[in-house]
Amino acid sequence: MTVPRLHVTAHHDGARIRLAVSGELDVSTRDEFITAAVTNAHRGAALDLDLSEVSFCDTMGISALVAVGNIIRGDGGSVQVTAASPTVTRILGATDLVDAWRPV
């Protein structure tokens, strides 16, 4: 049995959508993550990303976060990271993206 490398669960609460993400954000899961985020968000949605269970994130994972942010914000919505694993926190800090993803 193959264990999924990425798992995304969506919780809808009116205009807010919380995506709980676990596993790995990298080149092999990038498109899956973007599709899950965009599919669950609607025009003008507030997307809260819980990345506390992300065990691995590389530059392609960061590019996926940036892509989702651009798509959602471009459609009138907002995106914030509400929880992050040490791995995600470290890579956001190393790329100077911490402030861009901080909850408002």
Image: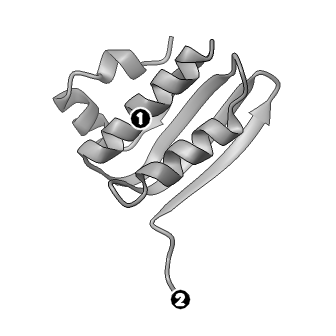
Question: Which amino acid lies under the numbered mark 2 shown in the image of this protein?
Answer: Met
Q: Earlier in the sequence, mark 2 or mark 1?
A: 2
Question: Which amino acid lies under the numbered mark 1 shown in the image of this protein?
Answer: Leu
Label 2 to label 1: alpha-carbon separation: 29 Å
Q: Which of the 4 image quadrants contains residue 98?
A: top left
According to the picture, the residue beneath numbered tag 1 turns out to be: 65
Q: Which of the 4 image quadrants contains residue 77?
A: top right
- Is 29 located above or below residue 46 in the figure? below
- Asked whether 67 or 52 is in front, the reply is 67
| Labelled pair 2, 1 in contact (Cβ < 8 Å) | no
According to the picture, the residue beneath numbered tag 2 turns out to be: 1
**Which residue does the image show at 62% across and 17% down from the upper left?**
75
- Asked whether 95 or 93 is in front, the reply is 95
> Could you say whether the residue bearing mark 2 is in a helix, strand or loop?
loop
- Asked whether 92 or 78 is in front, the reply is 78
- Is 11 located above or below residue 46 in the figure? below
Q: From the viewer's perspective, is 67 left or right of 63?
A: right
Residue 49 locus on image (x, y percent) = 54, 34
